[in-house]
Structures are given as structure tokens and as C-alpha cells.
Image (spheres, grey):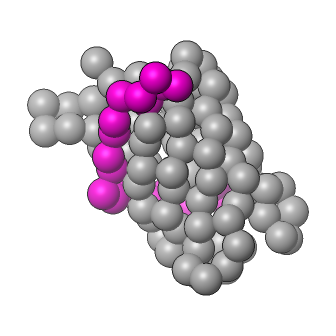
Amino acid sequence: MTAVAGTWELKLKTPIGTLTASYTFVETADGVTGTATADGESVPLTGITTQTTPDGERVGWRHSVTRPMRLNLDFDVTACGDELTGHSRAGRLPRTQVTGHRSA
């Protein structure tokens, strides 16, 4: 079973302020699928990768958003127990710190 399966409440510290979003990861026979929900917008996660490390499970994915602006986001985080830390990046913009906790 993947350590990231479940629902996570994430905070992204961006140059325009801290944004919050809910991410749901589901383990299937074909791998991990997921969705992100924020500001009434729900989008699928793509390219989800997982790798077990000594610090937890490293997880990467991509998705696009239209709010607060149109962006393509790439995530690289580590899930350990019910906590998640890492970063996201939107093109050439600076890295955004990501933290989160499992809510379900």
C-alpha cells in the first residue's frame, strides 16, 4: 500500500499568499490516481510517481489550475505518516513551499 493514499489538506506558500487545497490519492491496480480541489475547481493529477525513501514516500505529480491564475504545476513532496512536506514549481516561477496533513 502506498503511504500517500488518502485525503490531504495542503498549504502552498506562494508569492501572492498562502493557498490551501485538498488532494485525494487513491491506490488502484494500475498505480496511484488523484485529484486536487480548491476554489470550486477540481482537477485530475497526472504523472503520479512514488518512491520509498528512508524519510518516507517521495511523491511527484503534475496538474493544471485556472485559479488564481492559469498555471501548470509540478510537485515533489515526501509523505511520512500523516505529514507531507516538499515543494511545487510553476514554470520559471520560484519554488513554492508545500506542507500538509492527512485529513482522512
In the image, residue 98 sits, relative to residue 93, either above or below, namely above
Q: Which residue is drawn at 20% across and 38% down?
A: 31
Residue 29 point in image, percent of width and height: 12, 31
Quadrant of the rendering where the N terminus is positioned: top left
Specify whether 94 is left or right of 61: right
Say above or below: 68 vs 83: below
Q: Most extreme residue toward the left, as rendered? A: 29
Predominant secondary structure, magenta span:
strand
In-image side of 24 versus 11 (left or right): left
Q: In this view, does 43 lie to the left or right of 100?
A: left
Q: Tell me if residue 12 comes above or below residue 85 in the rendering.
A: below
| Residue visible at 53% across and 36% down in the picture | 78
Can residue 6 be seen from the camera position used here? no
Q: Evaluate whether residue 15 shows in this view.
A: yes
Between 76 and 6, which is closer to the camera in this rendering? Answer: 76
Q: In the rendered structure, which segment of residues is drawn in magenta? A: 38-57
> Quadrant of the rendered structure where residue 30 is?
top left
How far from the left and from the top, in percent, is residue 69? 67, 79
Nearest to the observer: residue 1 or residue 20: 1
Seen in the image, is 32 located left or right of residue 70?
left
Q: Residue furthest right?
A: 17
